[in-house]
Image (spheres, rainbow, N blue to C red):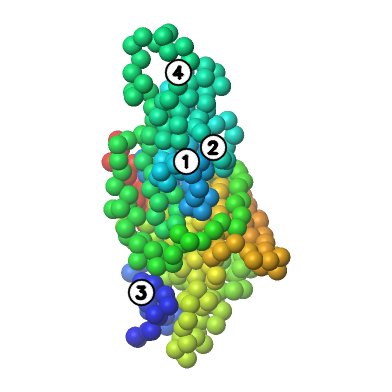
């Protein structure tokens, strides 16, 4: 069926057609049920290999609006290494390790966003670096007769800006091919123009659960009508969804209330009014295109049974008045506190509590949970390549 979606990314026409097919014919008959060993969530050796892999891949740590002005700085620790992301006076965004090159002291003590006027000063011995990470001052320079200042700049990390988000790789290196990694979702996210958006609020929390259990919650359309029945579940019509791989990532779409009527009357404006596109950027970033705003969330594994959760509610512009602010407060409260924290992360903690009980040697998954199998296969493939 030909659709006219001039106000939407063209990829949504494809997704919409697939979703219509799901409503008419049910799930893809080529998909089947499958199982995953519980050991995948409890093996500490495997977990360390996973964390090592994650440090070699791009992770979205911020929206560009949070690091827009020169001197804007983010100290971020959840990637497994202490990271600084800073906007230089030349407008270039740089990432580097938050570690002095003299004796390894942390330069920015407190994690989070801050404003840096001149650069970074080590409180231990006074070594100083500019916003670009260059070593600019060594007290009593004569004490280091063979010191090569250029070899003691802060250790750089690969970083880029794409889709309005800041992507950082936690392993030092000359370069990273961000384009080949992020290009598969260019048709979906680039047309949204998120570079001009702003973050209304950032929510963070920790949860006592394995990170893969959390990622599975956002690759699974099967649970929505049950877990979210008192929050967002009623917004989704028939709880029908369609998912497909996009390179290492997963794109999905689920029908909202009014979906059938809009399709039958050919009255499709902004597709987000009748369906919700969602994305999992491999390995651990979640992106949900809600009506009028988007959510970017990342699950950082901080232990075998613990994650750090970070969620930015991204809106088109700063609220103009108290009424607009109250509107976004309600959305934030619903998505961050009631859905993400109160339901998704909560149920993941309930799963974690039973992992080592012996009740299950393997978990069983159905057709609507197929993206979980794709994601695990990609994770396994990349871990094997690192061996």
Question: Which residue is depicted at the point 48% across and 61% down?
Answer: 196
Q: Which mark is first along the chain, 2 or 3?
A: 3
Q: CA distance from mark 3 to mark 2?
A: 41 Å
Question: Which residue is depicted at the point 56% across and 64% down?
Answer: 317
Q: CA distance from mark 4 to mark 3?
A: 55 Å
Q: Label 2 neighbourhood size at 10 Å, few (<14), some (14-19), many (20+)?
A: some
Q: Which mark is first along the chain, 4 or 1?
A: 1
In the rendered view of the protein, which quadrant contains the N terminus?
A: bottom left
- Image coordinates of residue 362 in percent, x first then y, are 46, 50
SS at mark 4 in the image: loop
Question: Which residue is depicted at the point 40% across and 29% down?
Answer: 134
Picture quadrant of residue 151: top left
Q: Is residue 318 above or below residue 144?
A: below
- Check disc 4 and report the residue beneath it: 138
> Between residues 368 and 157, which one lies in front from this camera angle?
157
Q: Which mark is first along the chain, 3 or 4?
A: 3
SS at mark 1 in the image: strand
Q: Is residue 57 above or below residue 328?
A: above
Q: Is 281 on the left-hand or right-hand side of 349?
A: left
Q: CA distance from mark 2 to mark 4?
A: 19 Å
* Res 86 label: 1
Q: Are marks 1 and 2 in contact (CB under 8 Å)?
A: yes
Q: Is residue 367 visible?
A: no
- Check disc 3 and report the residue beneath it: 10
Which tag is nearer the camera, tag 1 or tag 4?
4
Q: Is residue 193 visible?
A: yes
SS at mark 3 in the image: loop
Question: Which residue is depicted at the point 71% across and 65% down?
Answer: 322
Q: Are marks 3 and 2 in contact (CB under 8 Å)?
A: no
* Res 116 label: 2
């Amino acid at each position: 069926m030909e659709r006219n979606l001039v106000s939407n990314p063209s990829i949504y026409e494809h997704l919409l057609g697939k979703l219509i097919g799901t409503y008419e014919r049910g799930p893809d008959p080529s998909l089947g049920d499958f199982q995953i060993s519980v050991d995948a969530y409890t093996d500490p050796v495997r977990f360390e290999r996973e964390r090592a892999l994650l440090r070699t891949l791009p992770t979205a740590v911020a929206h560009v609006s949070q690091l827009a002005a020169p001197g804007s700085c983010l100290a971020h620790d959840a990637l497994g290494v202490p990271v600084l992301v800073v906007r230089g006076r030349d407008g270039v965004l740089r990432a580097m390790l938050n570690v002095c090159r003299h004796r390894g002291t942390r330069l920015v003590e407190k994690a989070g966003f801050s404003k840096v006027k001149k650069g970074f000063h080590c409180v231990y011995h006074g070594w100083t670096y500019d916003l670009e990470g260059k070593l600019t001052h060594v007290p009593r320079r004569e004490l280091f007769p063979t010191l090569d200042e250029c070899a003691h700049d802060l250790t750089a990390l690969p970083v880029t800006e794409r889709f309005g988000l800041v992507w950082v790789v936690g392993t030092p290196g000359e370069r990273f091919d961000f384009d080949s990694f992020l290009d598969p979702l260019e048709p979906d996210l680039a047309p949204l123009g998120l570079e001009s958006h702003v973050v209304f609020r950032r929510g963070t929390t920790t949860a006592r659960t394995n990170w893969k259990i959390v990622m599975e919650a956002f690759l699974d359309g099967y649970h929505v009508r049950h877990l979210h029945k008192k929050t967002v579940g009623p917004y989704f019509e028939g709880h029908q969804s369609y998912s497909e791989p996009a390179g290492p990532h997963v794109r999905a779409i689920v029908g909202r209330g009014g979906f059938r009527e809009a399709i039958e009357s050919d009255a499709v404006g902004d597709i987000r009014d009748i369906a919700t596109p969602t994305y999992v950027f491999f390995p651990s970033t979640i992106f949900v295109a809600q009506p009028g705003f988007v959510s970017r969330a990342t699950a950082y594994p901080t232990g075998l049974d613990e994650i750090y959760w970070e969620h930015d509610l991204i809106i088109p512009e700063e609220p103009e008045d108290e009424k607009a602010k109250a509107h976004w407060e309600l959305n934030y409260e619903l998505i961050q506190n009631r859905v993400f924290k109160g339901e998704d992360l909560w149920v993941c903690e309930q799963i974690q509590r039973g992992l080592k009980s012996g009740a299950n040697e393997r978990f069983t998954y159905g057709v609507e949970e197929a993206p979980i199998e794709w994601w695990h296969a990609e994770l396994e493939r990349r871990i094997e390549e690192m061996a």
